[in-house]
Amino acid sequence: MARLTSDERELNEQAVRAAMDWLLSGDLPPGGKTDIKTLAAEAGVCRTAFYPKKNRAGTPRPGSYQHLAEEFEGRLRALQEAGQCVDPRAAQIERLKVQVAELKYRLAKRDAALAELTGFKTLAISRLTAQHQEIECLREQAADVGNVRLLPAARSGTVPYESCS
């Protein structure tokens, strides 16, 4: 890989700064994020130039545009601390996380109410069953005794009692 001239390096730094301003203003390319990868792609420079390197001896040395990566991350952090959301996807993710938590809470409340109503239904059915069995038992006892008479049915058109008015 050929070494960059100082003019090419200056042009690349200007392109990186322009891309940095563009990304930090919230204008993200489709599928892009506010990160070094997108910054490098938009500036048209190699992404590895933003990270530290190692010499042949194994000692670390700064990447060609590492100072710009640090500046980018610092400006991004400052915007986030100021309450600005540069990446609309991150804001959407946070909004969806809050919405999911709210829906989970509502679902848990609804499940608890459903369990309570199911318990009430079971209790009501068992009570109705017990009452029905008691009525059946009383009917059988009344039929066995034989001293119970049926009352005559009311004639149609007559009132069994006098009017209260």
Image (cartoon, helix red, strand yellow):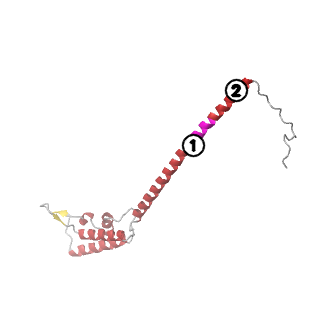
Q: Give the x, y percent position of residue 9.
A: 23, 73
Q: Residue at x 57, y 43 (%)?
A: 120
Q: Nearer the viewer, residue 120 or 74?
A: 120
Observer-nearest of 89 and 28: 89
The three-letter amino acid code for the residue at tag 1 is: Phe
Q: Report the magenta stretch's main SS.
A: helix
> Which residue lies at the image location 39% right of the left edge and 61% below the top edge?
31
Mark yes or no: residue 65 visible: no
Work out how far the residue at label 1 is from the one at label 2, CA to CA, in angstroms.
31 Å
Disc number for residue 120:
1
> Mark 2 and mark 1 in contact (Cβ < 8 Å)?
no
Residue density around tag 1, few if under 14, some if 14–19, many if 20 or more, within 10 Å: few
Q: Which residues are magenta?
A: 122-129
Q: Quadrant of residue 136?
A: top right
Q: Nearer the viewer, mark 1 or mark 2?
A: 2
Task: Characterize the local packing of mark 2: few (<14), some (14-19) or many (20 or more) Cα atoms within 10 angstroms.
Answer: few
Q: Nearer the viewer, residue 106 or 24?
A: 106
Residue at the left extreme? 57
Task: Determine if the magenta segment contains residue 30.
Answer: no
Pick the front one: 58 or 46: 58
Q: How many marks?
A: 2
Magenta region includes residue 128: yes
Q: Which residue is mark 2?
A: 141
Horizontal and vertical percent position of residue 81 = 35, 69
Q: Is residue 71 left or right of residue 132?
A: left
> Mark 1 or 2 closer to N-term?
1
| Residue at x 58%, y 41% (from the top left corner) | 121
